[in-house]
Image (cartoon, coloured by chain):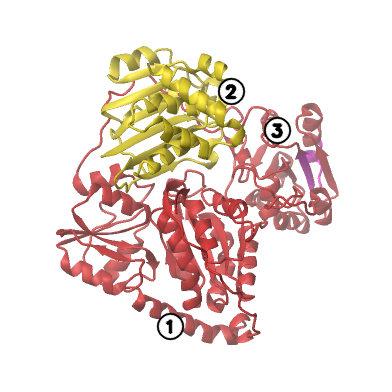
Chain colours: A yellow, B red
Amino acid sequence: MMKSVVFAGVGGQGVILASKVLMETAMNAGYDVRESEVHGMAQRGGSVECNVRFGKKVYSPLIPKGGADFVIAFEMLEALRKLEYLNDDGKLIVNRFQITPSSVQNGDAEYPTDIEPWIIENVKNQLFVDTAEALKTVGNAKSLNIMMLGVLSQYLDFTTEDWHSAIRSLVKPKFIDLNISAFEKGRELSQ
Amino acid sequence: MKKVLLGNEAIARGAFEAGCTVVASYPGTPSTEITESVARDFPDIKSQWSPNEKVAFEVAAGASVAGARSMTCMKHVGLNVAADPLFTFSYTGVNGGLVIINADDPGAWSSQNEQDNRHYARAAKVPMLEPSDPQEAKDFTRAAFELSEKYDRPVIVRTTTRISHSQGIVELADPEQYQIKPFVRNPKKFVMIPAHARPRHIVIEELMLKLRDASATLPFNRIEWGSTKRGIITAGASYNYVKETCPDDSILKIGLMWPLPDELIRQFAQKVEELIIVEELDPFIEKYVRMMGIKCKGKELIPLCGELTPDIVDAALNGNAHENRIPPYAGKIPARPPALCKGCPHIAVFSVLKKLDLNVNGDIGCYTLGVLPPYSAMHSQGCMGASIGMHLGFEKANPALARNSVAVIGDSTFIHSGITPLIDLVYNKGTGTVLILDNRITSMTGHQENPSTGVTLRGEPTYELNLEALCRACGVDRVTVIDPNNIEEFEKVVKEEVAAEAPSVIIARRKCILKK
């Protein structure tokens, strides 16, 4: 058994922390884990991608095209960009949220208006979630990453306690309650 | 105890476990987090940001000669800057173990080139270890200190982006209680006048042969026997892709990249029907194997340029194409390139340079993004500090260019390699204008302190380098300090200084929008 998860977003959305929490959860459940992430110049408002894989033994931290069981997109355009990773039964989870890239701001390109209908038509296993309202209830937009994990958690076999303890060990003490609550809101969003 | 660590954090841990005393580095993706992790997680180690990689290397070399285990960390192009000390400290050898962490960037994710620094190990005659995962990153770093002392060689540990910026589970070990050795004066070993260098050259050639002969028994290289129909020699990140896509083949995994293990290679090659070398970038192992007279395949299958992926290896070795399972989106997906942040002080600078239609000799930093739309206001760039020397070269080629061109360089890059070319510009009677974009931090690599911020890596207050006084001391009389967001005044100053027939420096000072 090996599971491959792609997290896709934009610099500043907390993609790397999301991948860390998933890794910690998987390690505590007894799996080998590998991850690959993008740093440096790629971060200045650019696309950010993390590959996380867990299983009995994982070699490649990079997920092949058509090899991901999950693509978790924190932004709609990034969902479109990472579709190549999804395997035949792979699940695409998309945050219904748009961040305008510089190429669109400069007038060099247009932000597509048909992303959601196109995905619904072409990706059989997909879920769009509205995090904006839920994040307001939680009170901090920065916990989007943990909320998206809450959505993902419904499709993985880890216990709530596994997830909570990983969150507790990786976020700053004063943000633990907030993030646990974001995680729980995320679980509700997947229903 | 097991912990999920980034490759770079694992290297820091390895240095800690080895009893390392001094770590001196200059930031550079993908190496930066090593030294940050040392400072954060192992405060007993004396860690520092030096002004550049050459200085960092020499601080580490000094600590080694003085008897301590020491380490210096840099990206691939950083080792170009530190190549001078590398080649001669190879001759002197060490006292306390000296380890150089070199992070290559195949794919040029955050770099100006894709150079393959394995060549440095061969050229400088130093051992090089290459880990494949965070566990090995830690273990090899720790072992590198012992190897360094045992064979009296500085040792390079080479990573690539997919090792440095990849997380995995690491089994931690207790640190060694390393006793710092005494410094013993030994000019024949540590002062490389020609009369000392010639015999040392013979010594180091012998040491490298000794290490090569021992390499079959060292724990870094191993043969994993599978089917003998096909044998693959591989290393580093490529090993992971081979393990994933060719689980039945025999593999010779190289961990000690230099000197290569002749004996193991021969043994392995004799037993397999077909031999393939899977390596990223240059045919480094392949050429060596061919030189041994062994038939193999390599770069006719595996690309020379760019980063490898499991897809590429699977296609090259097994003919398996990895295709999109979802039909591609019919419309255009707008690119999301990195861009200057909202409120970034560089935006004002590049708006003005664009408006004035100046030729811009650029440099390395966030501000290199000035080359992209909507500014499109950078016309040359090469390596750290090149802007100022190139700017003088422009003027030497065609004096008129001094009146419609500028050099643009960041605060940290100026301190790294911009001071000597500024001295050159004045000394050789240049009249150009240099803009120092002083945003009070080394921003592109993720906000590291530097000598002009007045704070050390460890967060201690220190002397704050005065850039305006420094420029004046280089002989520049026309030094202006201005906030670029004061855009009208800034534009006026740029026009005046470019027009003036005397060398000038404009320090555009406004702190990075992300700096707290």
Q: Residue furthest right?
A: B477
* Relative to B299, residue A20 above or below: above
The structure residue drawn at horizontal position 39% and vertical position 27%, both measured from the top left corner, is A152
Residue B4 lies left or right of residue B319; in this view the side is: right
- How many residues crowd mark 1 within 10 Å: few (<14), some (14–19), many (20+)? few
Where residue B345 is drawn, which disc sits there? 3
Q: Are marks 1 and 3 in contact (CB under 8 Å)?
A: no
Where residue A140 is drawn, which disc sits there? 2
- The total of numbered circles placed on residues is 3
Location of residue B186 (image quadrant)? bottom right
Distance from label 2 to label 1 (Cα)? 63 Å
Residue type, label 1: Glu
Task: Give the foreground label among 2 and 1.
Answer: 2
Residue type, label 3: Pro
Q: Position of residue B209 (x, y in %)?
A: 39, 79
Q: Which residue is mark 1?
A: B206
Viewer can see residue B66: yes
Residues drawn in magenta = B496-508
Residue B344 lies left or right of residue B41; in this view the side is: right
- How many residues crowd mark 3 within 10 Å: few (<14), some (14–19), many (20+)? many
The structure residue drawn at horizontal position 60% and vertical position 46%, both measured from the top left corner, is B364
